[in-house]
Structure formats: structure tokens, C-alpha cells
Image (cartoon, rainbow, N blue to C red):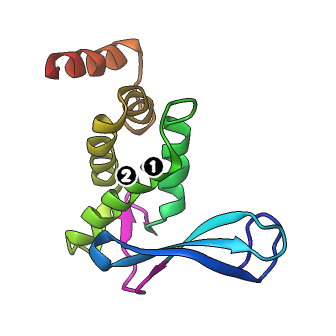
């Protein structure tokens, strides 16, 4: 596995544990060259899950895109990378667990919001503002009022 920091192809596995009810193995690795640690995931290759976008185009599910969206939503919040990984694992597990070969991007967003709401309200609102494409301050306030009523 290539080190994301220095590009060295040699690393050792420091820790290995199953996630997603044994569907995936999470491995912590340490680079032999720069000694930095990074995480890799080992999964069984399956039929690709296709995401149906709003314009009806289709693309394969990309964990990295979801990670980037969550990192932006959680920026400067007291949320660890492990917590973000856990949310992504849960979302991915729920999507693959549905046994559907095509899932709408709307459904992926709703599932993500479901887990984010429990993790951090500010990150939830940030993610919702991009995902739901709030047109103006009123739609933003409607979402906040809905959250307050649920409390």
C-alpha cells in the first residue's frame, strides 16, 4: 500500500479490525520511510452501487465524495476523523444493506443527515444547507425551526 504522505510503497500493518459486521477490515498502517500512520480499508469487491443524481445521470458510489462533504460540514467542530469514518461506515452499510443496485443521491443525503443530526447539530445544518440547496434565508430558518421543535 502506497503511503499518502511520501509515496513509499512499503508499510506495515499496526492494527487491524473488522467493521460493518465483518464486511470490511480497517487497517492502520505505518510507513517504513516517513513513519507516518494512515488508514486503509479492505472490502470484498461487489457489483458497483450506482448513484442516481438529480439530473438522472448515474455514477458509481464514491466514498471519497461523501468523506469530503462531511469534512467540510464538520470543519472546526469537535468531531474526530474516527467519528466521521463511523458515520460514513453507517451510511455505506445502510445503502448496501438495502440490496438496491441504484440509489438516489437524495436518499444518500437523507441517510447521512440522519446520522449527522445525532452527532453534531451545526454539522447537520451545514451539510443540509448544501445538500438541500437552501434557496434563501427563509428555507434555512424553516430547517432550524423544525430542529428546534424536535427538541
Kind of element beneath mark 1: helix
Kind of element beneath mark 2: helix
Q: Is residue 9 left or right of residue 129?
A: right
Question: What is the residue that sits farthest to the left in this orientation?
Answer: 150
Can residue 82 be seen at all in this image of the molecule? yes
- Where does residue 7 sit, x and y in percent of width and height? 81, 73
| Residue nearest the viewer, comparing 59 with 57 | 59
At 83% across and 67% down in the image, what residue appears?
34
Q: Quadrant of residue 124?
A: top left
Is 28 situated above or below 136? below
| Residue nearest the viewer, comparing 98 with 80 | 80
At 34% across and 63% down in the image, what residue appears?
92
Q: Does residue 111 show up magenta in the picture?
A: no
Mark 2: few/some/many CA within 10 Å (<14, 14-19, 20+): many
Which contiguous range is marked in magenta? 42-59
Is 22 situated above or below 70? below
Q: Does residue 56 show up magenta in the picture?
A: yes
Q: Is residue 16 left or right of residue 89?
A: right
Numbered label attached to residue 84: 1
Contact flag, marks 2 and 1 (Cβ < 8 Å): yes
- Where does residue 139 sit, x and y in percent of width and height? 33, 19
Can residue 53 be seen at all in this image of the molecule? no
- Where does residue 133 sit, x and y in percent of width and height? 41, 32
At 38% across and 28% down in the image, what residue appears?
125
| Residue nearest the viewer, comparing 109 with 8 | 8
Numbered label attached to residue 87: 2
Most prominent secondary structure in the magenta stretch? loop
Numbered label attached to residue 39: none
Mark 1: few/some/many CA within 10 Å (<14, 14-19, 20+): some
Cα distance between the residues tagged 2 and 1: 5 Å
- Where does residue 69 sit, x and y in percent of width and height? 51, 46
At 54% across and 44% down in the image, what residue appears?
71
Amino acid at each position: 500500500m502506497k503511503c499518502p504522505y511520501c509515496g513509499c510503497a512499503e508499510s506495515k500493518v499496526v492494527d487491524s479490525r473488522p467493521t460493518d459486521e465483518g464486511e470490511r477490515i480497517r487497517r492502520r498502517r505505518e510507513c517504513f520511510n516517513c513513519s507516518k500512520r494512515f488508514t486503509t480499508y479492505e472490502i470484498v469487491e461487489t457489483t458497483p452501487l450506482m448513484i442516481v443524481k438529480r439530473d438522472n445521470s448515474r455514477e458509481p458510489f464514491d466514498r471519497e465524495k461523501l468523506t469530503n462533504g462531511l469534512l467540510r460540514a464538520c470543519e472546526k467542530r469537535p468531531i474526530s476523523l474516527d467519528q466521521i469514518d463511523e458515520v460514513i461506515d453507517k451510511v455505506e452499510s445502510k445503502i448496501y444493506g438495502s440490496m438496491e443496485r441504484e440509489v438516489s443521491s437524495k436518499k444518500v443525503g437523507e441517510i447521512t443527515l440522519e446520522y449527522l443530526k445525532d452527532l453534531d447539530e451545526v454539522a447537520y445544518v451545514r451539510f443540509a444547507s448544501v445538500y438541500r440547496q437552501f434557496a434563501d434565508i427563509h428555507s434555512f430558518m424553516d430547517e432550524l425551526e423544525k430542529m428546534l421543535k424536535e427538541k
